[in-house]
Image (tube, rainbow, N blue to C red):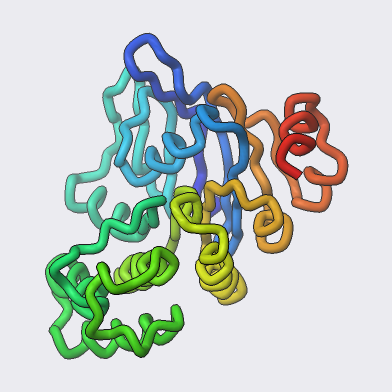
């Protein structure tokens, strides 16, 4: 089984059907970029994987374990709460907004979850955090507070913070959409590096050039469904669906 296996998931907010019978497989080490117009359900889909949203129906398997088996909102998964929590800790999400703790330095922000959630000793967490901060190119900002960092730097700290939990899967929800254009490249460079190192990633993005360069698979969502998916060279050069063609003509 794939590292992520999604079977026929749906999500409703009252009478509004946001996700409609979506299925998708993601292999270990695969980078999947999710594109589509605003309101297509992309962010809701991503947030459903780690229970920031609760699906109404369908199944979600993570690393072969049945995380969700829902019918009319009721989860029939056999997992205990502890088992469910352990699976969710294997996924980390990076949002549009950085959500750093303003009263903590870069180092303190990155160390926090490993110490308090993973129960790592502080010295081990500190050493790992220093390495990750260097990895995202901010080793000179260890003791700097978020207010003194640019938006791109704050987002790189947010990525380091997520990586500090040693996840199997990274989820990115439009990680560059809140940034000034000149800062986008520095964040995408970090994500590209993770891709080259074999991190499994799902990335909701409007950066079509990034998706073309980095993705193993591109998913086009429209009106709550996956309308089309395929390799970047195939989907961007020869989209099968008229709605995909119209979207790409508008954004390219």
On the question of residue 166 being in view, the answer is: no
Q: Position of residue 65 (x, y in %)?
A: 39, 49
Please determine whether, in this image, residue 96 is positioned above or below residue 42: below
On the question of residue 220 being in view, the answer is: yes
Please determine whether, in this image, residue 56 is positioned above or below residue 37: above
- In terms of image quadrants, where is residue 248? top right
Q: Is residue 147 left or right of residue 60?
A: left
- Residue at image point 51% right, 37% down: 42
Closer to us: 237 or 175 = 175
Q: Position of residue 217 (x, y in %)?
A: 68, 51
- In terms of image quadrants, where is residue 154? bottom left
Closer to us: 174 or 129 = 174
Q: Is residue 166 left or right of residue 35?
A: left
- In terms of image quadrants, where is residue 120? bottom left
- Residue at image point 40% right, 71% down: 153
Q: Is residue 119 left or right of residue 133?
A: left
Q: Position of residue 243 (x, y in %)?
A: 74, 25
- Residue at image point 31% right, 54% down: 87
- Residue at image point 30% right, 36% down: 77
Figure quadrant of the C terminus: top right
Q: Position of residue 14 (x, y in %)?
A: 32, 13
């Amino acid at each position: 089984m794939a590292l992520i296996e999604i079977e026929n998931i749906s999500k409703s907010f009252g009478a509004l059907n946001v996700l409609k019978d979506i299925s998708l497989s993601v292999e270990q080490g695969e980078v999947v970029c999710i594109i589509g117009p605003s309101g297509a359900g992309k962010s809701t889909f991503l947030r459903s994987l780690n229970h920031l949203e609760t699906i109404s129906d369908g199944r979600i398997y993570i690393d072969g374990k049945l995380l969700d088996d829902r019918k009319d909102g009721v989860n029939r998964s056999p997992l205990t709460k502890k088992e469910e929590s352990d699976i969710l800790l294997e996924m980390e999400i990076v949002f549009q907004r950085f959500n750093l703790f303003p009263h903590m330095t870069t180092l303190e922000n990155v160390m926090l979850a490993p110490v308090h959630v993973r129960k790592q000793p502080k010295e081990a967490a500190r050493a790992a955090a220093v390495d990750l901060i260097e990895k995202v190119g901010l080793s000179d900002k260890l003791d700097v507070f978020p207010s003194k960092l640019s938006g791109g730097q704050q987002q790189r700290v947010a990525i380091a913070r997520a990586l500090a939990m040693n996840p199997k899967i990274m989820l990115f929800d439009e990680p560059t959409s809140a940034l000034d254009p000149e800062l986008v490249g520095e964040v995408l460079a970090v994500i590209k590096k993770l891709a080259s190192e074999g991190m499994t990633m799902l990335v909701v993005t409007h950066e079509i050039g990034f998706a073309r360069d980095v993705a193993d698979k591109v998913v086009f969502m429209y009106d709550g469904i996956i309308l089309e998916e395929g390799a970047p060279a195939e989907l961007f050069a020869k989209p099968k669906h008229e709605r995909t063609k119209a979207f790409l003509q508008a954004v390219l």
